[in-house]
Image (cartoon, helix red, strand yellow):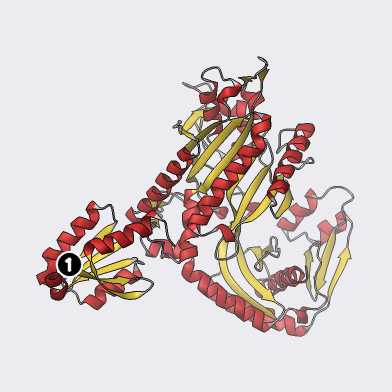
Amino acid sequence: MELEMLRHSASHLLAQAVKRLYPDVKLGIGPATNVGFYYDFDFSTPITMADLEKIEQEMTKISKENLKIERFELPKDEALKLMQDQPYKIELINELPEGEVISFYKQGEFVDLCRGPHVNYTAKIKHFKLLSITGAYWRGNEKNKMLTRIYGTAFPTKEELEKHLEALEEAKKRDHNKLGRELGIFMTEENVGQGLPLFMPKGAKILQKLIRWVEDEEEKRGYVLTRTPLMAKSNLYKISGHWDHYRDGMFILGEEGVDDGLKALRPMTCPFQYMIYKNGIKSYRDLPIRYAETSTLFRNENSGEMHGLIRVRQFTLSDGHIICALDQVKDEFKNALELSYYIMDTLGIREDITFRFSKWDPNNTEKYINEPEKWESTQKLMKEILDELGLNYVEADGEAAFYGPKLDLQIKNVYGKEDTLITIQIDFASAERFGLEYTDADGQKKRPIILHRSSIGCYERTLALLIEKYGGAFPTWLAPVQVVVMSLTDRTIDEVEKVYAELKAQGIAVQKDTRSEKIGYKIREAQVNKVPYMLIIGDKEKEQGVVSVRGRKDGDLGAFALDEFIKKIKHEIETKAR
């Protein structure tokens, strides 16, 4: 709480400095975050990164002035008069409920609308740093004006700030948005559009490996594969409830009353798989039915929220729906979580995961299906499951899906920003809406329960996190290029070709480098590209029928017979060693 208060106060310090330097600036909002703070501004003329230094100097000056930070309250009419030159503040004040306390904080000549709390004097805000500038739509809505967001961070001590800045520099090196492009994994193109990444051969190869592995693992665990359309008529989404609760996040096609009417690109797979379930009579003996699909989905994310591969407008999800009886829910939920554990363990990210029990907000019935009794009973069931599993979770009101509560497996990127990687959800509403049923042992028709789940999550987001986790140096089984075979001289090119062909025949992702370059240059290039193994063939190796092996991690490993090396690397690949 003290750190949050310090950072919130630092955002006011920033706003005061900006107001002194740019008197006609319009102020947005300036909250603390889990890694620092930001403030949104509407400048009459754009600023650049070069301007941050003078803003920071002004902040330091204000800090040294040791201004007292004081809270005061005003009635609504006086608050509006005070903020008459600040349209964004006027908008916020006008939206406050009648009787709401309208509080302000004053430091010197600067006054800001704010709930607080803050530190008592500006001199307490000493150790801060402005970090970046970006665009941000007012209130996150792309229909609103684009403002300028200035990010910064602050700490109680100089040592803590320096340590954080050092960690940030390391994070920049591992940032998937930078590293993924440098390694030729993905790219973006203005003419294609924001949030629509293009996967280059290396990135496509990694995704292919992940998808094949996950699909095979799901099949082993009783899932059956489906393949469903990328779009549907609005009727389908009206039945599911997405049309009422999620329409703003969908890409709508066509026109009402023309041809087949309105359609939408699918933001989820569930209603399509429900239609497959309905094709034929089901009995209790058929349950549980586990449908899985590698689904391309589309969500109309706001421009300001998109970031690299973490949040995009078209993505691929390891989607799945388990349709089961009520007495099967606990086991199926646990099995779904166990599958995700296995995948996270194999990828080496399980220790990075935290758990969030996402519940509905009974005060926001527009966002959710308004059936309080079903919400309470379903949330009670999920809590029982989570407690039986012994999970250390936090509860979050207002984060549920509109049709039921969920367990979110949360993970942070290199900058500490948290996102959901995997979810398991209990749906109490869709079976009724779609008329899903089965015949029970007593011959009665009953409604099943539906679990929505993902095993690896969104492939693009997972790939981004793996790039950052490994700094682009993927485990051998996942590396897009596992071996580079290099010629030491032109005399050994023919031997390189033979070794290359044999490795390729063994299913190993191999490249050859027969350029007339020095071997040190070739090795350095392979190391920059994070290739796990380099095989070097000179006259001696050719004569002895061996290859000199160099490992990305361990350096020179000595000479190997080719079949010996193949055995070594295939074992590494098959066991998915890290």
> Residue 83's quadrant in the figure?
bottom right
Split into 4 quadrants, where in the image is the N terminus? bottom right
At label 1, the amino acid type is Thr
Asked if 452 appears above or below 529 in the picture, the reply is above
Asked if 213 appears above or below 545 in the picture, the reply is above
> Residue 503's quadrant in the figure?
bottom left
Split into 4 quadrants, where in the image is the C terminus? bottom left
- Element on which disc 1 rests: loop
Residue drawn at the location 46% of the way across and 40% of the way down? 220
Asked if 278 appears above or below 70 in the picture, the reply is above
Give percent across and percent down for residue 275. 53, 24
Q: Viewed as shown, does residue 505 lie left or right of 94?
A: left
Does residue 74 appear in this view? yes
Q: Nearer the viewer, residue 578 or 36?
A: 578
Residue placed furthest toward the bottom: 64
Name the residue tied to disc 1.
Answer: 514
Give percent across and percent down for residue 95. 78, 49
Give percent across and percent down for residue 216. 43, 42
